[in-house]
Amino acid sequence: MPSDMPIEDITEELEGFGIHPKECKVLISRKTGLPMPIFAVFLDKTPDNKNIYNLKEICSMKIEVEPMRRKFGPAQCFRCQGFFHSSKYCTRNPKCVKCGKPHLTKDCTKMQSEEPTCCHCQGKHPANYIGCPNNPLNRPPPPPKVNFWQERARKKKEMLEAAKAKSNPEAQPVVFTPTQTKPTTSSQQPQVPSSSSESNQQAQMPSSSPEIHPSHVPSQQNHITTRKEPPPPLLRLSHRSTTLRSRKWWKSFTNS
């Protein structure tokens, strides 16, 4: 559509199709400052307004409707090329997005054949390049925040445990080294004593009975289970019984 198309004619045409726009305006080029043949229409999210994507002709002219393209990443200033603010209220020194020199982008005289220079990292790309290493999207995430009081309590606890361990050192564990036995092989067979040596050993052995360690003897103590006597029952006197007893005492006292 031509840039000099009246906005009132566009809104009336859309109203005839059952589309109710909130605002309609022509877009202006940032380079030249002149209106472009592109119109922005702002609508509410309703089923009727979604039919605007099916329109192919308005005011006897062919059109193409498409949603606005969102820019990924944080907001970037067009004046100083900084992040997280706009150029409307920026008071910093200007920087060019193409050559990185201290002047506005519209005053740059760099040719298109020349390579751009980033004002952030001095790389061969414009300052609004998303892949720039100084772009907040490409920076490493900040370290996790640590609570000061929790960290202080943790350090204090570690110091107390270290002081306690230093004052009461633990006993060193005793290490038992098992004795190694020589394995018997098939080649080294045990020597069989002769009959004469056996008779001599039997004569030298005493006639006393072999000793038995008390740990191997099973205990024959009779385990007697004692039954605990139950505690005496508690005497519970109701209010009625106490009143009857007080009356009997008073009668006996008056009769006497």
Image (cartoon, rainbow, N blue to C red):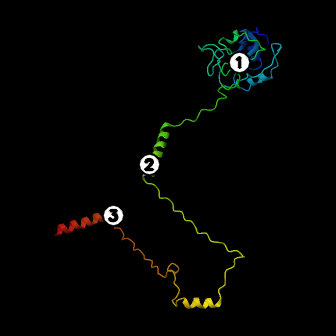
Residue at point 50% right, 40% down? 151
Do we see residue 172 in this rendering? yes
Image quarter hosting the C terminus: bottom left
Dot 2, crowdedness within 10 Å: few (<14), some or many (≥20)?
Answer: few
Above-or-below relation of 85 to 179: above
Rounded to the nearest angstrom, the CA distance separating label 2 from label 1 is 60 Å
Where does label 2 land, which residue? 163
The amino acid type of the residue labelled 2 equals: Ala
Residue 37 vs residue 126, the one in the foreground: 126
Query: In the rendered view, does 47 fall on the left or right side of 92?
Result: right
Q: Earlier in the sequence, mark 2 or mark 3?
A: 2
The disc labelled 1 sits on which kind of residue?
Thr
Relative to 101, is 161 on the left or the right?
Answer: left
Badge 2 or badge 1: first in the primary sequence: 1
Q: Which kind of residue does numbered mark 3 sit on?
A: Ser
Q: Which residue lies furthest to the left in this view?
A: 256
The mark found on residue 238 in the picture is: 3
Q: Say the numbered circle drawn on residue 228.
A: none
Residue 27, image quadrant: top right
User: Looking at the image, is mark 2 or mark 3 nearer the viewer?
Assistant: 2
Res. 9 in view: no
The label number, if any, that marks residue 117 in the structure image: 1
Residue 244 locus on image (x, y percent): 28, 65
State the image quarter where residue 235 is shown. bottom left
**Distance from Cα at disc 1 to Cα at disc 3:** 101 Å
